[in-house]
């Protein structure tokens, strides 16, 4: 039972784990990996009060579902889920939860990492940071692009360095 949700309200990590485990254990899962992302209280310019996330209803959920489908095709997982929050979130608030289940831990870890790396590149969610009671849009980070490119390059096969 793959699930993808966008919501403004907070989530319970335990409830999401239980939801993922209930079905995946019946499918032979021997490993469940979860990741929870938190809102940082700083950026490169200093402290921030929080963030504000906007999304495109319908399109964002479809993109999350497509990402889970890609992970399921690429890795040997039996189940997966994503919950992403939107709206105004204070520092240290939970922002995203990803869970993957597999028969073996390596595939569950790889799938969870893939989902998080690709999420910022393939899902329409936009972020503003609040600093000194003013908000500014956050541009894509080079590190996020690099993380996604690692997976995209791996899809094409090994790269050759020719002199």
Image: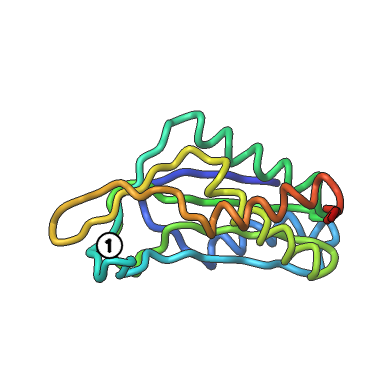
In front here: 39 or 19? Answer: 39
- Residue lying at 42% horizontally and 32% vertically, measured from the top left: 56
12, 40: nearer the viewer: 40
Rendered-image quadrant of the C terminus = bottom right
Residue nearest the viewer, comparing 11 with 139: 139
Judged from the image, the secondary structure of the residue bearing numbered disc 1 is strand
Q: Where is 52 relative to 98, above or below?
A: above
Residue at 24% x, 70% y is 47
Could you tell whether 5 is left or right of 87 in the image?
A: right
The residue to which callout 1 is attached is: 90
Question: Please, which residue is most extreme toward the front here?
Answer: 163
- Residue 40, quarter of the rendered image: bottom left
Q: How many marks?
A: 1
x then y, percent, for residue 162: 85, 53
Q: Position of residue 80 (x, y in %)?
A: 68, 53
- Percent across and percent down for residue 35 are 57, 66
Please rate how many residues cluster around mark 1, counting C-alpha atoms within 10 Å: few if below 14, some from 14 to 19, many from 20.
Answer: some
Say above or below: 73 vs 103: above
Q: Is residue 117 above or below residue 91?
A: above
Q: Is residue 152 left or right of residue 147?
A: right
Across and down, in percent, residue 134 comes to: 16, 53
Q: Please indicate whether residue 97 sits to the left or right of residue 150 in the image.
A: left
At 62% across and 45% down in the image, what residue appears?
3
User: Which residue lies at the image location 30% right of the left edge and 49% below the top edge?
Assistant: 128
What is the quadrant of residue 23 in the picture?
A: bottom right
Q: Is residue 68 left or right of residue 140?
A: right
Outermost residue, top side = 58
Rendering colour mode: rainbow
């Amino acid at each position: 039972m793959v699930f993808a949700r966008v919501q403004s309200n907070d989530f319970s990590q335990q409830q999401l784990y239980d939801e993922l485990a209930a079905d995946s254990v019946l499918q032979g899962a021997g490993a469940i990996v979860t990741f929870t992302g938190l809102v940082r209280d700083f950026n490169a310019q200093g402290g921030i009060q929080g963030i504000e996330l906007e999304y495109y209803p319908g399109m964002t959920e479809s993109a999350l579902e497509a990402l889970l489908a890609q992970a399921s095709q690429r890795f040997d997982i039996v189940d997966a889920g994503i919950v992403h929050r939107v709206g105004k979130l204070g520092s240290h608030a939970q922002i995203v939860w990803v869970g993957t289940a597999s028969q073996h831990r390596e595939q569950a870890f790889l799938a969870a990492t893939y989902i998080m790396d690709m999420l910022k590149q393939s899902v329409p969610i936009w972020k503003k940071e609040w600093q000194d009671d003013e908000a500014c849009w956050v541009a894509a980070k080079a590190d996020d692009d690099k993380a996604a490119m690692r997976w995209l390059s791996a899809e094409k096969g090994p790269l050759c360095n020719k002199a």
